[in-house]
Image: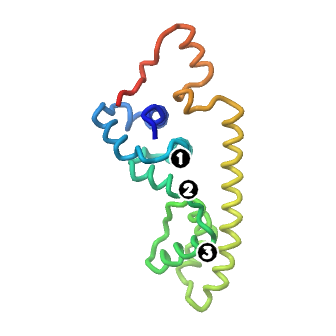
Amino acid sequence: MTPENFKKGMLILREAFPDRFAEMDKTSMKTWFQILNDIPDQDWENAVLFICRNHEKPPLPATIRQVVRLSVHVLSAEEAWAIVWEGVRLGQNKYDDPVIQKTYDAIGYPTWRILTYSDANAARAHFFRLYEAFRKREDTKIEFCAIERSKGVNFLESGGQSESERHLRQKKGSETKNELKI
């Protein structure tokens, strides 16, 4: 990732999570960049936007990496089933992938709790149908967001500013005071 794209993403994170990122000093910024600089620019942009849209708490570098990893490889229904089946065996009921979590929740904790190997085939088939439906819905939502972004200003290219904000800054001839240094 380029330093410029990193700065733009961090500006967006600062706007979305001001309590966490407002006071980041130059050393912290350099550390975060060293941890995350191997992420491709497009994956970084997608991860920042996904986190801002879907997370209530500010991310750690590991969270950003996990979002990138999940977005790069979309799990098949079979792979998702393997994750959930192992989780059920271990008593897990929370999953990082939102589609897996929706599918798990749709089937319901009581069902998972009493599920045995003998009736796993029926649950597996039900899981596959639900997972594919939720995955398709999620993909449609992502496509819609991409279309909406392409219609308007590219938020990352604008440094997290709307068209009107950029116009006002250009008109005044002043530079943004939110510039990050790395």
Foreground mark, 3 or 2, reads 2
Closer to the camera, 116 or 161? 161
Disc 1 marks a residue whose amino acid type is Asp
Dots 1, 2 in contact, CB < 8 A: yes
Dots 3, 2 in contact, CB < 8 A: no
* Residue 80 locus on image (x, y percent): 57, 70
Whether 34 is drawn above or below 62: the answer is above
Disc 2 marks a residue whose amino acid type is Val
* Residue 116 locus on image (x, y percent): 55, 88
From the viewer's perspective, tell me whether residue 14 is left or right of residue 102: left
Q: Residue at x 64, y 79 (%)?
A: 124
Disc 3 marks a residue whose amino acid type is Glu
In three-dimensional space, the C-alpha distance between marks 3 and 1, rounded to whole angstroms, equals 25 Å
Q: Which mark is residue 78?
A: 3
Q: Which mark is residue 81?
A: none
Q: Which residue is mark 1?
A: 43
CA neighbours of label 1 inside 10 A, class few (<14), some (14 to 19), many (20+): some
In three-dimensional space, the C-alpha distance between marks 1 and 2, rounded to whole angstroms, equals 8 Å
Q: Which residue is mark 2?
A: 72
Foreground mark, 3 or 1, reads 1
Under circle 2, the secondary element is helix
* Residue 78 locus on image (x, y percent): 61, 74
In three-dimensional space, the C-alpha distance between marks 3 and 2, rounded to whole angstroms, equals 17 Å
Q: Residue at x 68, y 50 (%)?
A: 141
CA neighbours of label 2 inside 10 A, class few (<14), some (14 to 19), many (20+): few
Looking at the image, is mark 3 or mark 1 earlier in the sequence? 1
Whether 178 is drawn above or below 40: the answer is above
* Residue 100 locus on image (x, y percent): 58, 65
Under circle 1, the secondary element is helix
